[in-house]
Amino acid sequence: MSSAYQDDRKMIDSIDNKLVALISERIRTAKKIGAAKGSDCKANLWDIEREREVFSKWARIADEEGLSSYYVGRILREVLNYSRRVQEGFLENGQSKVARPVTRVGYQGVQNSYSYLALSKLFSCRNSTCLKPIGFRSFAAVVDALSADVIDYAFLPIENTIAGSLNDVYMLLREQQTSIVDEEIWHVEHCLAGLPGANLDQIQTIRSHSVALQQCQSFLAKITWASAEVYYDTAAAAESVIAQGDPRVTAICSKECALEMGLKILQQDIADQHHNYTRFVLVTSKPEKVDKRLPCKTSLQFTVCHRGGALSEVLQAFARRQINLSKLESRPQPDSPWEYLFYIDADGHQDDPEVADALTEIREYTNYLGILGSYPRRSHELDEIPSRHTQLDESVQAEHIVISPRSKVDHDVKQLTNSEAVIDNVQLQSKINIGNVEIGGSQFVVIAGPCAVESRQQIFDAATMVKDRGARILRGGAFKPRTSPHSFQGLGFPGVEMLVEAGRNHELPVVTEVLRTEDVDRVANHVDAIQVGARNMQNFALLKKLGTINRTVVLKRGMSATIDELLKAAEYITSGGNQRVVLCERGIRTFESATRSTLDISAVVVLRERTNLPIIVDPSHAAGRRELVIPLALAAAAAGANGLLVEAHPYPEKALCDGRQSLTADDLNQLMTRLEQIVNMNGHTLS
Ligand code: PEP
Ligand code: MN
């Protein structure tokens, strides 16, 4: 090698050192400005005009110097991005408040995987003292570690510009009560790496993650002499190349990974598409505060009601408020054929008044609405020219967004002014499906059946009776919460199966009670609605779990629960995402002992004032005696309830539980006939 060449290399090294020193000086200065902006909450975080000026000045100088303005622009863009992120560290966001000695962040994969690299990038500017990345084998393992408090944050890929959304990750976020608090975008640039002695013509194996292999199809098609091998992680594939020590074995991984591991890059930039970005999200158990000056986005997932135009109404709710949606995607749901789960990212924070309004409105059109989190938006960092951020209005203080309770079902405010309105406000009411039957609005629905499923014969006979008498939904308990441990406890899962079979046979949707969190998924997979009994109204773990499922929940009022407490219990479910809650008044404990409980008819009217959720009444458990059930049921209908939950048994004298209060077939007949007049009088129809 000539000495002149050596000298040039030395020169380049010294220029690079100067470049790094200059960047360091620039970041130090940016920090000084950041500290001032952080304490002055009225200061604009970023001056777009100034960024544009700096940008075009650089481009002009680059042109004059005969340099590519594209590359010079890219360098500047990253310097600007870096400065902005560093300044964010001075804002009093949730992140800087958490004074942890070590921040443990879980990710899927091993060191130097794309997840690892992206999380290192994100945390290089977050205000954390000591970062401890912990690799896990699967996404589920990362999320489990978060719920077990083994890690402080989970860092998960959520979408890729080529492969689309990672459904598995969305599903995991749905099941857990977590919040997205930040995002990171990583430009995925695959390379082929081998041992230092490797030669492209002699390779035999190309190992990588299935997605990476898929993204390099055209390149792989050209390397006909080697075969592809799926590995669970790109960096783990690179590690295996070293471990095997065979130069014929190679891996597709990031350039950073190859360099870090001392591998030789046999070919760079081998992906079919150059524009290949993966978006990662940082997830933790609680929402974090965000400085209002940061441009934010809010991620949602939802299912829409089966009603013409429901999706369009959701989109309109955002469009009318001029809220930009940066993402809209639909995915099939394996547990509900022909129902789709939609993913939306909307610009803005869920506590911005406009976004909050839109979210309240769309609850009416959704069966499930999961708000995954509001967090700083990073996608603008990819723009060639700095994009427009939310400019701070002079009058607006840079206060922090305080996370408000999500999905309120209790309106608090009185929206109704006269008694007719209490009954007639059907337009405002949510309509919720139990199977193909709609509850809410002007339809009055009767759910009937025995207290417990006792045998196949009994529940089939009950289903025949219910169907013939015109009730629309079949009830029957398989898990019975009994006061005495010696009483019949229900048939359990075989009982659920019998109920479902009987219902299907008579085209009746079915509802049954679940007592334990761990049974929810299994039961929900089969039935149309899940009942929460009076004794479980404040079983918060159960309510939280029911918030994550795709089934209607019939929530009964606790025996000594106030209306407030009932509404709060419903909010446990809706804030988990599940909007399909039907409230059920079933009598409360008072000093009166003439009835089993005292039916609180006024609860129907008060609830009507305070919530849009459908309200049904169970007169059976309130009365305790069959003779009282019909009059109480009629009173409930007159007060404006949306339906009834009544116990009816084909042979009540033989019932294993609650026979004394169960209607006979004749009683049910009479109830249905008499109900019709009252329901019609209210302008409703008996469905
Ligand atoms: C029931 O509906 O069978 C029941 C047990 O009711 P509650 O939870 O209202 O007592
Ligand atoms: Mn009962």
Image (cartoon, rainbow, N blue to C red):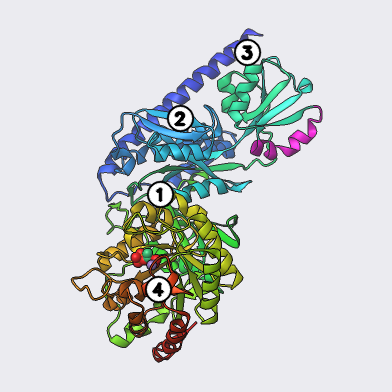
The image position of residue 127, as x and y in percent, is 34, 35
User: On residue 5, which mark appears?
Assistant: 3
Q: Are marks 4 and 2 in contact (CB under 8 Å)?
A: no
The residue drawn where x is 27% and y is 68% is 563
Main secondary-structure element of the magenta-colored stretch: helix
Q: Secondary structure at mark 4?
A: loop
Which three-letter amino acid code belongs to the residue tagged 1? Gln
Give the residue at the far front of this rendering. 654
Residue 385 in sight in this render: no
Ligand 2: image quarter: bottom left
Relative to residue 156, is residue 496 depicted above or below? below
Give the quarter of the image for residue 533.
bottom left
Which three-letter amino acid code belongs to the residue tagged 4? Pro
Give me the C-alpha separation between circle 4 and circle 3: 81 Å
The image position of residue 247, as x and y in percent, is 71, 17
| Disc 2: which residue | 134
Q: Earlier in the sequence, mark 3 or mark 2?
A: 3
Q: Nearer the viewer, residue 599 or 165?
A: 599
Q: Nearer the viewer, mark 1 or mark 2?
A: 1
Mark 3 within 8 Å of ligand 1, using the beta carbon: no
User: On residue 614, which mark appears?
Assistant: 4
> In the picture provided, is 267 more to the left or to the right than 202?
left
Q: Secondary structure at mark 3?
A: helix
* Span shown in magenta: 210-225
The residue drawn where x is 44% and y is 76% is 440
Residue 25 in sight in this render: yes
Which three-letter amino acid code belongs to the residue tagged 3? Tyr
Is 221 contained in the magenta span?
yes
Q: Nearer the viewer, residue 286 or 687?
A: 687
Q: Earlier in the sequence, mark 1 or mark 2?
A: 2
Give me the C-alpha separation between circle 3 and circle 2: 44 Å
Give me the C-alpha separation between circle 4 and circle 2: 46 Å
